């Protein structure tokens, strides 16, 4: 019988990683997905014309994407 692996995304010292875990704090396997994650979030914000408000380390932030002309 196989055990279903849950896919996780997390922040590391050098980027954003995605993969499966051995335990709560230990990766079984992981890939650096930093660029893809940033592109996906930016695309989501542009497509849905949204902003995201969040708290990180007790500080409040907002992320939004604005079109610029060069």
Image (tube, helix red, strand yellow):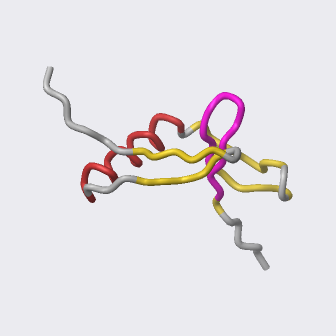
**57 sits to left or right of 1:** left
Q: Nearer the viewer, residue 7 or 68?
A: 68
Vertical position of residue 35 compared to residue 2: above or below:
above
Q: Quadrant of residue 67?
A: top left
Magenta-drawn segment: 8-18
Q: Nearer the viewer, residue 47 or 30?
A: 47
Q: Position of residue 12 (x, y in %)?
A: 70, 37
The residue sitting at the left extreme is 69
Quadrant, the N terminus = bottom right
Q: Residue at x 48, y 44 (%)?
A: 37
Q: Residue at x 46, y 34 (%)?
A: 35
Quadrant, the C terminus = top left
The residue sitting at the top extreme is 70
Prevailing SS of the magenta stretch: strand
Q: Nearer the viewer, residue 29 or 18?
A: 18
Q: Position of residue 7 (x, y in %)?
A: 64, 60
């Amino acid at each position: 019988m196989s055990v279903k692996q849950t896919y996780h995304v997390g922040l590391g010292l050098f980027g954003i990683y995605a993969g499966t875990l051995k335990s709560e704090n230990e990766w079984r396997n992981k890939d650096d997905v930093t660029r893809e994650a940033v592109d996906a979030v930016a695309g989501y914000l542009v497509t849905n014309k949204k902003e995201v408000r969040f708290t990180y380390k007790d500080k409040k932030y907002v992320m939004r994407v604005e079109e610029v002309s060069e």
